[in-house]
Amino acid sequence: MRLCANALAAGGVIACPTEAVWGLSCDPFSDQAVQRLLDLKQRPAHKGLILVAADEAQLNFLLEGLPESLRQKVRVSWPGPNTWLVPHRGRVSPLVHGRFESVAVRVSGHPEVRALCRTHGSPLVSSSANVAGSPAPKTLLAVRNYFGGRLDAVLPGQVGSAHRPSVIRDVFTDEVFRA
């Protein structure tokens, strides 16, 4: 855990198990780290990325200003496989929110990811650990096949029991963007 936290603090990109697949994570407040993650994945920045957190408090800077009814809707769905699109109001880098006025946020249900966010002290970028267009990896071996030694650290652990990545929906309309 400490090795991964140190790598994140130094602007690194790490692999970690999530609820359904292996993911790549970095510090969302380091444009250099986010750009490196995008480059590794060969993912265009305009698509945006997800932020995962240990708890709601780590996302308060993005949730403040939402009506209490919407905050409650989000709150009762966490921790777990529910990612919400909320207005970013310029509080995260365009490399994170892409071409959108919103940013995707989730309190992870994976204990190691939550512990890593706590240790790091903020939310993290979370994106599947694959090259864009390739299958999302369920094993560390698949991650190593994609990226070899180009990652700064690997968080030990196992992928959770979810069969697919989290649902992504708009906080205002409940429109589903990924089921």
Image (cartoon, helix red, strand yellow):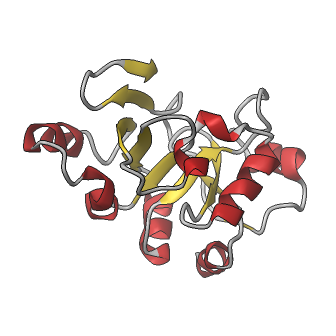
Which of the two residues, 90 or 30, is positioned nearer the viewer here?
Answer: 90
Q: Is residue 175 above or below residue 38?
A: above
Tell me the quarter of the picture where residue 101 sits.
Answer: top left
Which of the two residues, 99 or 107, is positioned nearer the viewer here?
Answer: 99
The residue sitting at 71% across, 64% down in the picture is 32
| In this rendering, position of residue 54 left or right of residue 2 | left
Count of marks overlaid on the render: 0
Q: Residue furthest front?
A: 90
**Image location of residue 110, percent across then percent down:** 45, 52
Q: Residue furthest left?
A: 68
The residue sitting at 48% across, 51% down in the picture is 51
Can residue 112 be seen here? The reply is yes
In the rendered image, the quadrant that contains the C terminus is: top left
Which of the two residues, 77 or 43, is positioned nearer the viewer here?
Answer: 43
Which of the two residues, 109 or 39, is positioned nearer the viewer here?
Answer: 39
Tell me the quarter of the picture where residue 129 sits.
Answer: top right
Can residue 18 be seen here? The reply is no
The residue sitting at 64% across, 64% down in the picture is 155
Tell me the quarter of the picture where residue 43 sits.
Answer: top right
In the rendered image, the quadrant that contains the N terminus is: bottom right
| In this rendering, position of residue 116 left or right of residue 26 | left
| In this rendering, position of residue 83 left or right of residue 22 | left
**Image location of residue 134, percent across then percent down:** 79, 29
| In this rendering, position of residue 2 left or right of residue 41 | left
Q: Is residue 4 above or below residue 81?
A: below
**Image location of residue 9, percent across then percent down:** 61, 78
